Image: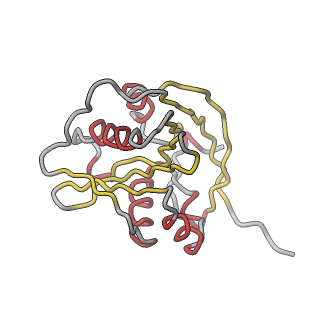
Amino acid sequence: MMTAEPVVRVGVVVTFLRMDAAPATPGPALPDGAEVRREPECDVPFYRFLYDTVGADYVWWLRRTMPDRQLAALLRDPRISIHVLYHQGRPAGFYELDRGNTPLVNLSYFGLMPHAVGHRMGFAFLRHAIDTAWQGGTRALTVNTCTADHPRALPTYLRAGFRTVRQVHEDWDVPVRLGLVIPDRLRV
């Protein structure tokens, strides 16, 4: 008989958002020393570095459980694109666009690394993601966030022009082996 893997039960409210038209005005410029580069051949170790670093404080766990072979296949999918924010030559954040349901595009992941939070890059970086997503016949852009994410995530998405479609409560079984720090406010 196999025993179940130890987990931490996490309760979150997930907010699903949608944008039905590209923003009418250009977004702010990234700060000096910042640039975004598409990573057309993003490999598994670099992706895991980005995902794990950005998501460490926000209980990003799903891709941590994905086997390398499965993640490598996802990264090779031409409908998935990885874009990395560099600030003064160092990775400072990333976003992932999924065009697998075109003309609907999903902003699957978006975030800054801890050292970049609070340096007034987030909104400009989000607008870069939005503007990139609207290239190429997009009819709608979706994203979701949850109460485990940074407290400014939802207000920033709304400020950028997304609207709330729905909210749902989810309970997650996060494997203990991942070593994530789970805030007490999220424990079920």
- The answer to whether residue 145 is visible is no
Q: For the N terminus, which image quadrant?
A: bottom right
Residue 52 location (% of width, % of height)? 44, 61
Residue 74 horizontal side relative to residue 90, left or right = right
61 in relation to 186, above or below? below
Foreground of the two, 174 or 62: 62
136 in relation to 40, above or below? above
Residue 152 location (% of width, % of height)? 39, 33
Identity of the residue furthest to the left in this view: 32
Residue 188 horizontal side relative to residue 95, left or right = right
Residue 161 location (% of width, % of height)? 41, 26
Residue 169 horizontal side relative to residue 48, left or right = right
Residue 147 horizontal side relative to residue 130, left or right = right
Q: Quadrant of residue 22?
A: top left
Residue at x-position 55% and y-position 57%: 61
182 in relation to 71, above or below? above
